[in-house]
């Protein structure tokens, strides 16, 4: 009994190695990456010489020297002031009026500016756990607002996706954990399907190649039977319609066979030229 069991185990292991199936674990993509969040563009092109949000409203800064403007520029004030300009630029795309701060589309634009700023920061400091948590919270909050807008005003939902260049990716209904065993099972099924389809295609091409000679023999046999029945003054069982039907099938097969042969010749010539 043990000997039989050992033989079956060895045979099954050998069969596994003969199957040409290779499973590679997909690359891990963090949830804050644009591929997962749906952001189709990065930070807006704001130059470092741009003035800060509050300082740009001052009348005195317009007549100030270049040195003073440089002090109050984004490049000198730091990333925090740059983040404020990013959020302002995103909100200006969608806000209804000058003082719009509380509409759904303005909140989505505000969160989008924060998300893209945090994504850019995470690319530079990928081990910052606090920053990763913040960007994920913003992404989840934006998804909730987009879901709300999609449910109650679909036209505005599409408009804001176009304005902010966002791809809506809703929360999945269910979570399925990826496993090597299940993936190998699916790959093996796909491999078996490919083998079966290849064999069926080869058998179909073989039958199609034999269809022409068979139709020729059938046509000759039908004509012979009809002539013999007419000469012997017997009941004619083969009509002209039957013969014309076979002739039409043979003509169609001849055209398809010529096209197939031309395609094979062209493929061979391309392969020879590439070599």
Image: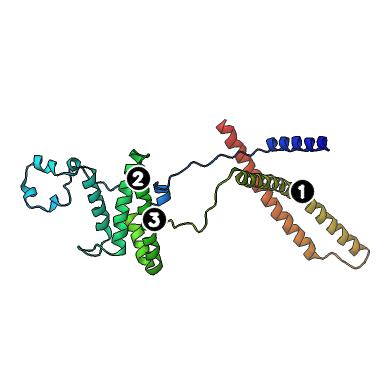
Q: Which residue is mark 2?
A: 130
Q: Which residue is mark 3?
A: 140
Residue 108 higher or lower than 203, as above or below:
below
Question: Could you tell me which residue is drawn at 54 percent across and 40 percent down?
Answer: 25
Q: Report x, y in % for residue 7.
A: 79, 35
Instruction: Give the mark nearer the N terminus: 1 vs 2.
Output: 2
Query: In 3D space, how far apart are the residues under numbered discs 1 and 2 (Cα atoms)?
Result: 71 Å
Helix, strand, or loop for circle 2?
helix
Query: How many numbered circles does the render carry?
Result: 3
Q: Report x, y in % for residue 201.
A: 69, 48
Q: Residues within 10 Å of mark 3 (few under 14, many from 20)?
A: some
Question: Could you tell me which residue is drawn at 52 percent across and 54 percent down?
Answer: 175
Of the 4 image quadrants, the one containing the N terminus is top right
Residue 110 appears in the figure: yes
Q: Mark 3 vs mark 1: give the one in front.
A: 3
Instruction: Give the mark nearer the N terminus: 3 vs 1.
Output: 3
Q: Mark 3 vs mark 2: give the one in front.
A: 2
Query: In 3D space, how far apart are the residues under numbered discs 3 and 1 (Cα atoms)?
Result: 63 Å
Q: Which residue is mark 1?
A: 210
Q: Residues within 10 Å of mark 1 (few under 14, many from 20)?
A: few
Q: Report x, y in % for residue 246.
A: 77, 59
Query: In 3D space, how far apart are the residues under numbered discs 3 and 2 (Cα atoms)?
Result: 16 Å
Instruction: Give the mark nearer the N terminus: 3 vs 2.
Output: 2
Helix, strand, or loop for circle 1?
helix
């Amino acid at each position: 009994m043990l000997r039989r069991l050992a033989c079956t185990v060895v045979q099954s292991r050998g069969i596994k190695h003969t199957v040409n199936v290779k499973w590679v674990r997909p690359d891990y993509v963090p949830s804050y990456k644009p591929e997962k969040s749906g952001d189709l563009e990065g930070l807006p092109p704001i130059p470092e010489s741009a003035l800060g949000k509050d300082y740009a409203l001052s009348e005195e800064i317009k007549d100030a020297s270049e040195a003073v403007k440089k002090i109050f520029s984004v490049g000198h004030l730091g990333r925090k002031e740059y983040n404020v300009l990013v959020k302002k630029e995103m909100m200006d795309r969608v806000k209804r009026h000058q003082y719009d701060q509380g509409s759904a589309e303005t909140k989505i634009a505000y969160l989008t500016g924060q998300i893209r700023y945090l994504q850019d920061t995470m690319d530079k400091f990928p081990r910052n756990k606090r920053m990763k948590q913040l960007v994920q919270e913003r992404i989840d909050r934006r998804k909730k607002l987009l879901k709300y807008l999609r449910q109650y005003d679909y036209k505005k939902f599409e408009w804001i996706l176009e304005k902010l260049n966002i791809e809506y990716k809703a929360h999945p209904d269910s979570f399925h954990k990826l496993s090597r065993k299940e993936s190998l099972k699916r790959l093996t099924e796909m491999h078996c399907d490919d083998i079966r389809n290849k064999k069926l295609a080869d058998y179909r091409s073989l039958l199609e190649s034999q269809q022409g000679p068979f139709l020729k023999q059938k046509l000759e046999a039908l004509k012979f039977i009809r002539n013999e029945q007419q000469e012997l003054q017997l009941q004619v069982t083969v009509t002209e319609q039957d013969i014309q039907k076979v002739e039409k099938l043979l003509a169609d097969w001849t055209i398809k066979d010529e096209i197939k042969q031309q395609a094979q010749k062209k493929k061979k010539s391309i392969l020879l030229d590439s070599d």
